[in-house]
Image: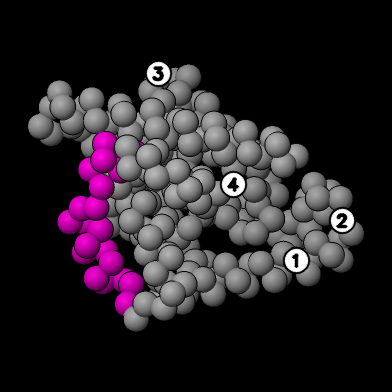
Amino acid sequence: MSPLSLVASIEKRLDALVELSRRNQRINVMTDRAPEQPTITISREFGCEGLPVAARVQMLLQERTGVSWGILDRATLDKMAQNRDVSEEIFRNLGGKNRFLDEAMSTILTDWTSDKDYYQHLCNQIIPFARAGHVIIIGVGAGILTQKMSNCHKFRIVAPMEFKVKSFAQRHHMSEDEAFKLIVKQQKQRNAFITDFLDRDVTDPTLYDVIFNRATNSVDQIAEMICYHIQSGQRKA
């Protein structure tokens, strides 16, 4: 994806989140107790693209339910932080910081460093969206942060190293040796991030409702199965 296309994509996701927060505000005004709405979290190994799956799930759910969904990822969170007016509107409508966030922070996030302060800032953004529903959150430890939230459906995408290397090398026009070294480095950093900040093992299968093998399932297949899970109202036991 070109830099201009990437910027446009992020802006489009931000616009959808603004509309999501405005809709949430209208619902809150109309009823004292809005029904619980689903949230999707997608964790993925480095080299297993999460955004194409999220975009496909978003399109399918919107077509089938007539309800708009937003996509939240690290790039969108960073973009939102750069626009104070937009950020304030979104979180005012979502209800901002709440009791669940205070509880989550006190139980899983301790001994802050400057880096951890930044991640706590991300958590302050992630949790209100997850509680409001109709959002697909990619990465940023959201599947772990939302473990106790009954409206959250948690998925992970994995693949054999050979598949990731070939796919990544092709997409980014590099040698397979370069792709392998980058994948190993980035996955190690991702795993350490979750361990250091949340004290959990991101590879623990019990953290997720469903784990998909990207080598044997296409983007469309994974998206269809996620939609089925959401629409059938399945919950973990």
* SS category of the residue bearing label 3: loop
Q: Earlier in the sequence, mark 4 or mark 3?
A: 4
- Please provide the residue range marked out in magenta: 90-110
Pointer 1 residue: 182
Element type where label 1 sits in the image: helix
At mark 2, the secondary structure is loop
Task: Measuring from the top left, give residue 59's x and y in whole percent.
Answer: 52, 26
User: Which mark sits nearer the N-terminus, 1 or 3?
Assistant: 3
> On the image, numbered disc 2 is attached to which residue?
174
Position of 191 with respect to 230 (left or right) is right
Which sits earlier in the primary sequence, circle 4 or circle 2? Answer: 4
3D distance between C-alphas at marks 4 and 2? 20 Å
**Is disc 4 in contact with disc 2, using a CB cutoff of under 8 Å?**
no
| Residue 67 placement, left or right of 192 | left
Q: Tag 4 or tag 1, which sits nearer the N-term?
A: 4
Q: Which residue is mark 4?
A: 50
Distance from label 4 to label 3 (Cα)?
23 Å
Q: Amino acid at mark 2?
A: Met
Judge the density around disc 1: few (<14), some (14-19), many (≥20) Cα neighbours within 10 Å.
some
Mark 4 or mark 2, whichever is nearer to me: 2
Q: Please report whichever mark, 2 or 1, sits nearer to the chain's N-terminal start.
A: 2
Chief secondary structure of the magenta span? helix
Dot 3 corresponds to which residue?
66
Q: Kindly report the distance in space between the C-alpha atoms of the residues bearing marks 1 and 4.
A: 17 Å
Alpha-carbon span between mark 2 and mark 1: 11 Å
